[in-house]
Image: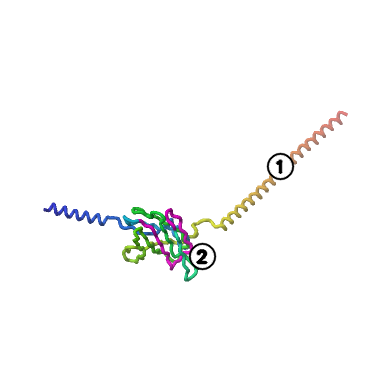
């Protein structure tokens, strides 16, 4: 009797462990390739897993935050998918690189031209975005995932501080501290020009130094030649004097 009760309890416990240790459902998320620094540009990936066993994901819509509009959004081509970028008028124009921007991207939609994301697979959808806001620590994107059986899952719930993660959380992009160079630390044209000028100055200075050395060498050579010539002339004069003296003695 005790043995049977122990066996039943073990079976229940085992089932509970299997349920509790089962994989948590994945959801649509966003993450940067590298860093997403405030005020700069970044490449971000929207990762979309297929959570259904009997349908494929055929469409993804990502809405962009209206409180922090992004002037530049460019999708990277994804094989088997077409991307459509939708823009909207801004209530307050943005100033980007010294010019006024009156509209920004409000939504990007990817639609499968083939089988889509089949069961057991996921797909990444890359975007180049920027400039990122300097007065925010994160950006919240609301996403809608559509399946081939017409089922729609809305990933639009915003995480609240001190509360558990919602059932369908919206993708959140965390922003890092602003960097000195918002474009990834590449050298600017002015810096390259300055370097070029410095190189030219260095080369010119080197040429002048070389010319000075050459002149000095020429002067030294001339002095040496003249010195040797003077010695030869002096020796010839002495020899001539000796020869002339002998001739007088003989006479």
Residue 112 lies left or right of residue 217; in this view the side is left
Question: Residue 54: x percent and y percent?
Answer: 32, 55
Classify 219 as above or below 19: above
Taking the magenta stretch, the answer to whether it contains residue 52 is no
In this view, the residue farthest toward the right is: 251
Q: Which mark is residue 96?
A: 2
In the rendered structure, the answer to whether residue 203 lies left or right of residue 30 reads right
- Residue 133 visible: no
- Tag 1 secondary structure: helix
Numbered circle sitting on residue 99: none
To which residue does mark 1 refer? 221
Can you give x and y, in whole percent of width and height, for residue 145 in the image? 37, 60
Q: Few, some or many C-alpha atoms within 10 Å of disc 1 (few <14, some 14-19, many ≥20)?
A: few
The residue segment tinted magenta is 56-82
Instruction: Report which quarter residue 21 is drawn in.
Output: bottom left
Image quarter of the C terminus? top right
């Amino acid at each position: 009797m005790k043995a049977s009760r122990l066996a039943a309890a073990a079976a229940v416990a085992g089932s509970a462990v299997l349920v509790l240790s089962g994989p948590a459902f994945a959801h649509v998320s966003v993450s940067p390739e590298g860093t997403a620094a405030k005020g700069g540009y970044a490449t971000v990936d929207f990762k979309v897993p297929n959570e259904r066993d009997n349908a494929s994901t055929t469409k993804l819509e990502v809405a962009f935050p209206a409180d922090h509009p992004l002037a530049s959004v460019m999708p990277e081509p994804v094989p088997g998918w077409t991307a459509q970028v939708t823009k909207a008028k801004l209530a307050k124009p943005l100033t980007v690189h010294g010019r006024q921007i009156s509209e920004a991207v409000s939504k990007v939609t990817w639609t499968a031209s083939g089988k889509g994301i089949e069961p057991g697979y996921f797909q990444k959808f890359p975007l180049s975005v920027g400039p990122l806001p300097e007065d925010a620590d994160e950006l919240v994107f609301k996403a809608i995932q559509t399946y081939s059986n017409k089922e729609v899952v809305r990933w639009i719930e915003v995480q609240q501080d001190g509360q558990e993660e919602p059932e369908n959380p919206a993708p959140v992009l965390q922003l890092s501290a602003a960097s000195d160079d918002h474009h990834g630390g590449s050298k600017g044209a002015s810096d390259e020009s300055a370097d070029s000028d410095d190189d030219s100055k260095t080369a010119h200075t080197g040429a002048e130094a070389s010319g000075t050395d050459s002149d000095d060498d020429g002067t030294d050579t001339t002095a040496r030649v003249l010195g040797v010539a003077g010695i030869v002339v002096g020796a010839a004069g002495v020899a001539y004097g000796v020869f002339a003296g002998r001739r007088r003695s003989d006479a």
